[in-house]
Structures are given as structure tokens and as C-alpha cells.
Image (cartoon, rainbow, N blue to C red):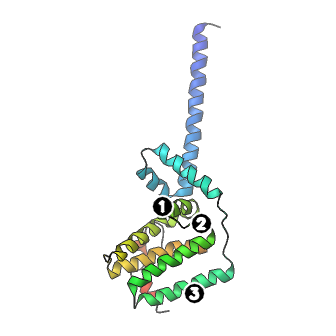
């Protein structure tokens, strides 16, 4: 075999290896996009590079696998559903307090399911593996809750916070969230108020 033939064979092997590696990377990327949905894009925007974001998401999957998550009992699910309905009724008379109570109720539900409830960013990271489609709502609700604690949230903001909290709340209960992920405007503007008139 001539030196030219050996070089051609080596080059072909390198090209095939590069193509195979690219296919593997594309498959991993597609799997992460599918699992994390809009959270994938959110993490990519936060990180220095796409590969750093994908490392972060794979690390979230690893940490999530270490959790001992528990399903809710029917009794517990009914208790949370009733607590949420009571919360919506209270919203009419005391919207500012109700948003704080919604935050606490969602945090209790997160904890009962087996997720850590420490820092908000850690909560988001753990929840993102199975509840990525409602994390945008949770972030928006939390931001309004923080503004409310500073006295900077309007009644409409507070109503939106309850709607946003409800999306994650429903997802954690195993129900179809009432708000499509990424599209809170699709819910009727008076949804939180209407629920009190059932």
C-alpha cells in the first residue's frame, strides 16, 4: 500500500469518526431539547456556550435521579385542591396576602413531592427535569411575589401571579395545567376571579 493510499484511508476514518461524533452530539442535543422544552433555551441564554448549558442540563438530570420523589395520595391531592380553591376565594378580599399564601402552598406541595425547597434557583433546577413546561410561569409568579413584598405589584400583577402559580401547582398535582406553557395570555384575564364564583 502506497503512502498516498494510507493517508486517504486515515482521512476517511477521521471524517467518518467526525460525522459519527456529530450525530451523537445532535442526538443528545435533541433529547435535551425534547426533555427540557423552553427551559433548554432559557439555560442556553444564561450560559456562556451551548455546551456549557447542555452540561448544566445533564447535571440537573443526574441530581434529579438522586431525589426520592413520591406521588401524592388521593387524599393529599384532594387536600391541596381544596386549599387552592379556598385561596382563590380569599383573593377577592386580600390579593396581596393571597399571593404570599399561593407561594407557600406551592412550596409545601413541592416539598411533599420530595423536591428540595431551599434556594429558588435550586428549586427551578430540580423541577426543570419533569416540570420544565411550567417553569416560566413559576419564575413569573415568583418575580411578582418578590415585587409584592416590596409593595410594587398592582392588583392585576397579583392576579397574574395566582394564574402563574396555578400552572405549576396543577402540573405538580398531575393535572393538565390550565395555562399553556409559555402562553399565559391564552388564559382568560378574569380566570382567578372567575374561579371564586363557582
Which-is-in-front pick, marks 3 and 2? 2
Q: Residue at x 58, y 24 (%)?
A: 14
Q: Residues within 10 Å of mark 3 (few under 14, many from 20)?
A: few
The correct choice, above or below, for 135 with respect to 151 in the image is above
First in sequence: mark 3 vs mark 1: 3
For the N terminus, the quadrant is top right
Circles 3 and 2, Cβ within 8 Å, touching? The answer is no
Q: Residue at x 41, y 84 (%)?
A: 97
First in sequence: mark 2 vs mark 1: 2
Query: Disc 3 and disc 2: Cα gap in Å?
Result: 22 Å
Residue matched to label 3: 82
Residue matched to label 2: 115
Residue matched to label 1: 121
Q: Nearer the viewer, residue 190 or 78?
A: 78
The correct choice, above or below, for 47 with respect to 21 in the image is below
Q: Outermost residue, front direction?
A: 118
> Which quadrant of the structure image shows residue 23?
top right
- Left or right: where 155 falls relative to 104: left
Say what secondary structure mark 1 lies in: helix
The correct choice, above or below, for 131 with respect to 85 in the image is above
Query: Where is residue 87 shown, x and y percent of the image?
Result: 49, 86
Which-is-in-front pick, marks 3 and 1? 1
Q: Nearer the viewer, residue 195 or 58?
A: 58
Q: Residues within 10 Å of mark 1 (few under 14, many from 20)?
A: few
Query: Where is residue 22 shown, x and y percent of the image?
Result: 55, 36
Q: Residues within 10 Å of mark 2 (few under 14, many from 20)?
A: many
Query: Where is residue 146 shown, x and y percent of the image?
Result: 38, 72
Query: Disc 2 and disc 1: Cα gap in Å?
Result: 13 Å
Q: Residue at x 51, y 60 (%)?
A: 122
Q: Residue at x 30, y 75 (%)?
A: 152
Amino acid at each position: 500500500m502506497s503512502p498516498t493510499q494510507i493517508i486517504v484511508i486515515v482521512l476517511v476514518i477521521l471524517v467518518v469518526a467526525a460525522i459519527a461524533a456529530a450525530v451523537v452530539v445532535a442526538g443528545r442535543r435533541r433529547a435535551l431539547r425534547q426533555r427540557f422544552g423552553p427551559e433548554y433555551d432559557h439555560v442556553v441564554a444564561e450560559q456562556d456556550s451551548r455546551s456549557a448549558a447542555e452540561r448544566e442540563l445533564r447535571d440537573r438530570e443526574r441530581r434529579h435521579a438522586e431525589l426520592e420523589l413520591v406521588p401524592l395520595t388521593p387524599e393529599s391531592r384532594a387536600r391541596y385542591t381544596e386549599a387552592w380553591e379556598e385561596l382563590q376565594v380569599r383573593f377577592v378580599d386580600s390579593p396581596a396576602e393571597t399571593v404570599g399564601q399561593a407561594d407557600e402552598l406551592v412550596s409545601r406541595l413541592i416539598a411533599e413531592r420530595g423536591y428540595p425547597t431551599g434556594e429558588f434557583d435550586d428549586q427551578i433546577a430540580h423541577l426543570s427535569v419533569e416540570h420544565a413546561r411550567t417553569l416560566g410561569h413559576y419564575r413569573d409568579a415568583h418575580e411578582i411575589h418578590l415585587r409584592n413584598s416590596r409593595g410594587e405589584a398592582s392588583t392585576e400583577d397579583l392576579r397574574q401571579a395566582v394564574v402563574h402559580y396555578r400552572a405549576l401547582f396543577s402540573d405538580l398535582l398531575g393535572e393538565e395545567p390550565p395555562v399553556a406553557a409559555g402562553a399565559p395570555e391564552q388564559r382568560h384575564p378574569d380566570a382567578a376571579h372567575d374561579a371564586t364564583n363557582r
